[in-house]
Amino acid sequence: MGEIISLKEMQPGQKARIKEILSSGSMRRRLLDIGLIKGTKIECVGKSPAGDPLAFYIRGAVIAIREEDCRNIIVEADDCRKKTVGTERKTVALAGNPNVGKSTVFNGLTGMRQHTGNWPGKTVTSARGTCRTKENEIQLVDIPGTYSLIAKSKEEEVARDYLLSGEPQAAIVVCDATCLERNLNLAIQIMEICPKVILCVNLMDEAKKRGISIDLPLISERLGIPVVGITARRKSTLNVLTDAVDTVLDEDPKETLKRKNTENLGFDERREILEDVGLSEQEKEDRIVTSLVTAAERVCRGAVKAKSRQDSRDRKLDRIFTGKIWGYPVMLIMLALILWITIVGANYPSELLADGFAKLQIKLTALFAAAGAPVWLHDMLVLGVYRVLSWVVSVMLPPMAIFFPLFTILEDAGYLPRIAYNMDKTFKRCGACGKQALTTCMGFGCNAVGVMGCRIIDSPRERLLAILTNNFVPCNGRFSALIAIITMFFAADVGAADGLGQSAAAAAILTLLIAGGIAAALVVTWLLSKTFLKGMPSSFTLELPPYRCPQFGKVIVRSIFDRTIFVLARAIAAAAPAGLIVWILANTVIGDISILNRMVDFMDPAGRLMGMDGAILTAFILGLPANEIVIPITIMIYTAQGSLADLGSLAEMQSLFAANGWTWVTALCTMIFYLLHWPCATTLLTIRKETGSTKWTLMASLIPTVLGFAVCSIISLILK
């Protein structure tokens, strides 16, 4: 007898016979018409790229059937399924605490054969990839890092629900060899709900450096599951893990269950606790957690030995990075250094990209002329859409390609969690959480990424506070304009005659400006927590991982593919229609003046009140899709051109601005409004997606705008 399953469960290459059709009405008749009567032989030959519909070989023809209809067709699958690699893909979940190297294991096993998306109905990102072992083709699902399956955050809820769904045939639990006992808490919980589990003890090299020895066979005996030790950054050590996965997947489930040391792990004890009607829910939870911790202690007793405490280096470094005297100054110095490297490093590649796009524009113009295209079509597509896109890429890509890897290096080295540790008391006084400091750091690269990063905050109220105030941190798209304005109107006046000195001065002034933005975020957070979002700060626990030497190669690749390209793609998607709109407004004349100039005249009184002018304010409004195009639009208005304009040097730009009435007060107000104005379109869409609320999306736009208008108006009133 074969296995009784639905047609939906068949895998490519698997054969079966029709046993029963549960469909009714016209669908049942259609299935019978194509020959699906009882006993019909059928073979699954593939799935569409989206996984639905499925394709089957039926009576000499290949028939596609939707997944929902496949559920109602019951078959008896042949026992002789194809066992070759690539015919049956088995699903394995990859679980673990944060900071155990789970992502390194995932990347090492899947390479570039992976894709990301959102879990169904959730905003938490999922990562799936394929991995070939000696005997199986595996779909590896990287579930969110979590300390427990007792769901408190979206990540923990997703991890728990996925493991309970029954989709994964096995689970790999990644643990840190330097703190195995604490990590085993999660591993034991997963063993209770998953029939097949492999314990992967990562960072064995770190454990060796710290004088920690682990008896892996003894751990395996006490757990009753395979236990392997690896160093994930060395890909060669992953072979032992894939061999263990093959062994577990091919093992009889009864043998797997028989091997599990359920008594030693306290499974029965916790079941009795849950069934005790005399205990409150809180008492049950306390006793279950105690039982889990005790079980982990029993497993590790005598199997994990440490010669002595080997984290003195980390403690010494923490005296600098988290110390009372040096903690905050080091944070500011680190920020200024990253900004300086970004400013200096981005100049040359930006110029190369701009030159390359300019040369390509000449060729595009020649192509349009050769094709006999009308002038208006050329101007709209080339001078409008193409020129905006080329500006965004040449301005955004180099700083992001430098900033994101530097940011990721700090993350990989273990420094970023310490920023949250340093800032928690400050954020708590504002009614928020120290983890908001991490999302603030993410906002430096892109505010949309910072908003998505707010998922790490457990409290919905505090998560919303972080989302609403993330825009006060200038993103990468605003850096270029701020740096240009600082260099033209301020850096040259502080004795910075040479290029490097001028860049250092610009970095210092930009750091002070960013500090002002963070201060504004804290003030607004405090006001919101006392008004619209009242509540007490939640509890705060955050693991401070050991300092590690970053994996520079993987950091660069990961930051470019996961962050730089992602952010750039979203900016391009927003900037392309913006270029079209700007061109139409600049070239559509009503009476004797263009729509764009009418907008400038209308906005001029408000702009003057804020210490700017109508051209600048109009440029900010039209720059909603992408902050990078605000300055080019301003130049276009000043030069009365019908397309996006650029000038050859900062000196030319400064002369143009000065001729149009710019002073250092104008520059200051423009920088402050760059810092304090509505989020870009990409960030607003992300806020809408993360909050699911139009009201809070509008609030996220209004709060910085109102504050920016007020601050600029006050400064203009005082200084003019």
Image (spheres, rainbow, N blue to C red):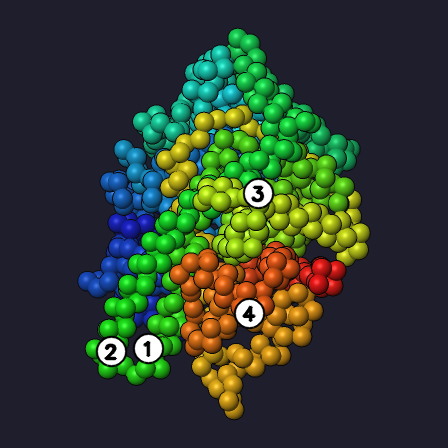
Q: Please state which of residues 541 and 712 is positioned toward the viewer in this rendering.
A: 712
Q: Are marks 4 and 3 in contact (CB under 8 Å)?
A: no
Q: CA distance from mark 3 to mark 1?
A: 43 Å
Q: Please state which of residues 233 and 321 is positioned toward the viewer in this rendering.
A: 321
Which secondary structure, mark 3?
Answer: helix
Q: Which residue is mark 1?
A: 378
- Label 1 is placed on what type of residue? His
- Label 4 is placed on what type of residue? Asn
Q: Which residue is mark 4?
A: 660
Q: Earlier in the sequence, mark 2 or mark 4?
A: 2
Judged left or right of residue 693, residue 344 is left
Q: Where residue 308 sits in the image (x, y, percent)?
A: 55, 9
> Mark 1 against mark 4, which lies toward the viewer?
4
Q: Is residue 395 visible?
A: yes
Residue lying at the far bottom in this picture: please name it.
591
Mark 3 crowd level (few <14, some 14–19, many ≥20, 10 Å Cα) = many
> Mark 4 against mark 3, which lies toward the viewer?
4
Report the label total. Answer: 4
Residue beneath the point at 64% across and 28% down: 326
Which secondary structure, mark 4?
Answer: loop
Q: Where residue 207 sits in the image (x, y, percent)?
A: 47, 18
Q: Which residue is mark 2?
A: 369
Q: CA distance from mark 3 to mark 2?
A: 48 Å
Judged left or right of residue 538, residue 240 is left
Q: Which residue is mark 3?
A: 508
